[in-house]
Image (cartoon, helix red, strand yellow):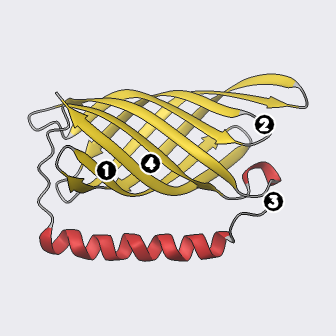
Amino acid sequence: MKLVNPIIITTIYISILFFNLLYCQIEHSHNHEHNNELGMAIGIVPGHEGEDSNLGLHLHYVKGLGEHNQFGIGLSLESILDEHQHNSMSLLGLYHFDNGFTIAYAPGILFSEHDGNSETKFTQHVELYYEFELDKFHVGPQFDIGMEDGGLHYMFGIHLGMDFN
């Protein structure tokens, strides 16, 4: 089942990021504490392992570090809802830029199933997202790249998060 053409998704996503970048250069004042954050991302993973597009889901907890909690460290769970049961658990390190953008790196372990056999592999994820602030909540576009031995996937989605003390 083909959900949406990846070229259309890419065009829409790049347009949203471009307009967000223009907006954040003009008006963004980033004031989240990021002391503790619970977040998730949901999106489309086009063409993973030769399949049609699938739904992807990321969950994370991050503890802020540094004078203004620009840095963070935490745990991340990722799942691609496909027939291979692609799931990973990772340590997550991130940096919050003052303009609202965040970049994260997450090395971890991939758990998957192929032809009835369970497999574990080393995996890495790079995540980029932008936050629109709504008090203690934030929302914005997210782009993820997942890399493991013999494979690469990416996800276009929406990041949702909540800060708490």
Q: Quadrant of residue 17?
A: bottom left
* Residue 19 % position (x, y): 33, 76
Q: CA distance from mark 4 to mark 1?
A: 8 Å
* Residue 122 % position (x, y): 62, 28
Please tell me which residue is depicted at 58% across the width and 70% down the height of the picture: 9
Q: Nearer the viewer, residue 70 or 85?
A: 85
**Residue topped by disc 1:** 102
Q: CA distance from mark 3 to mark 2?
A: 15 Å
| Label 1 CA crowd tier, 10 Å (few <14, some 14–19, many 20+) | some
| Label 2 CA crowd tier, 10 Å (few <14, some 14–19, many 20+) | some
Please tell me which residue is depicted at 43% across the width and 41% down the height of the picture: 40
Query: In what element is the residue under mark 3?
Result: loop
What's the mark number on residue 127? 4
What's the mark number on residue 125? none
Query: In what element is the residue under mark 2?
Result: loop
Q: Please say if the residues under marks 4 and 1 sit with CB atoms less than 8 Å apart.
A: yes
Q: Is residue 140 left or right of residue 76?
A: left
Nearer to us of marks 1 and 2 is 2
Q: Amino acid at mark 1?
A: Thr
* Residue 112 % position (x, y): 73, 29
Query: In what element is the residue under mark 4?
Result: strand
Q: Quadrant of residue 83?
A: top right
Q: Is residue 104 left or right of residue 82?
A: left
Q: CA distance from mark 2 to mark 4?
A: 22 Å
**Residue topped by disc 3:** 1
